Image: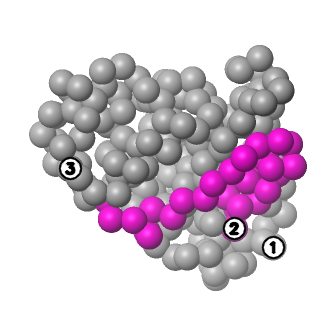
Amino acid sequence: MRGLKLKIMGIVCSPRKEGNTEILINEALKEAQKNGANTELIRIADMTISPCDGCESCHQDGECRIKDDAQELYRKLLEAYSIILGSPVYFWSISSQAKTFIDRTYALRYPFHRLNNKACGGIVVAGRKGCTGALETINMFFLGQDMIPIGLGIAGYSNEKGEVIKDTRAMNGAKSLGKQITKLIKLIHQ
């Protein structure tokens, strides 16, 4: 295990910078760092990523013909050992930023599933309802890419920006996710 650089990417799919979703992802990343991982946080809202147009040109060589910030994101996703994906809950599902991100990773399924065997975890934050549906969408994405999810995901509850820190179950769950995902990466790559 010496010299193995365990890179974990935290992907925030909230339009709100430093909001509740980002707080929970950062909590997971801090715990992963304590357990020997290198981490990187990416905010999808800071990027220009167009929606998938369904052209299916990626079926030929795995290359998306849309040239935007997703091209750099693909490189980072492929380099990472693990991905933590987080979204606020909007109308009982994931945000539009999360859906665009997921749709654009379709190109990484070709010529073979290039995200396969990456450890992953989902985090969602709702005001009151919708976490189950949002986590189901995230986990179906993970499974569709042949990734290895850690549990069913972390659900946080908050109505105001920054308030999720009062949700001790979610904060502890995020810490546990960071620890468990690092353990799984080490097991996979022994």
Q: Which mark is residue 66?
A: 3
Residue 52 x/y as whole percent:
23, 48
User: The N terminus is located in which quarter?
Assistant: top right
In the figure, 164 relative to 27: above or below?
Answer: below
Q: Which residue is mark 2?
A: 23
| Residue, disc 1 | 166
Q: Considering only order in the chain, which callout, 2 or 1, is on the residue closer to the N terminus?
A: 2
Specify the amino acid type for callout 2: Ile
Q: Secondary structure at mark 1?
A: helix
Q: Residue at x 23, y 52 (%)?
A: 67
Q: How many marks?
A: 3
Q: Is residue 173 visible?
A: no
Q: Is residue 29 magenta?
A: yes
What kind of residue is marked 3?
Answer: Ile
Residue at x-position 84% and y-position 63%: 168
In percent of width and height, residue 15 lies at 46, 72
Which residue is found at the position 35% from the left and 28% from the top? 109
In the rendered structure, the answer to whether residue 44 lies left or right of residue 185 reads left
Q: Nearer the viewer, residue 99 or 93?
A: 99
Q: Amino acid at mark 1?
A: Lys
Span colored in magenta: 23-49
Residue 87 x, y percent position in the rendering? 53, 59
Check the picture and name the quadrant holding the C terminus.
top right
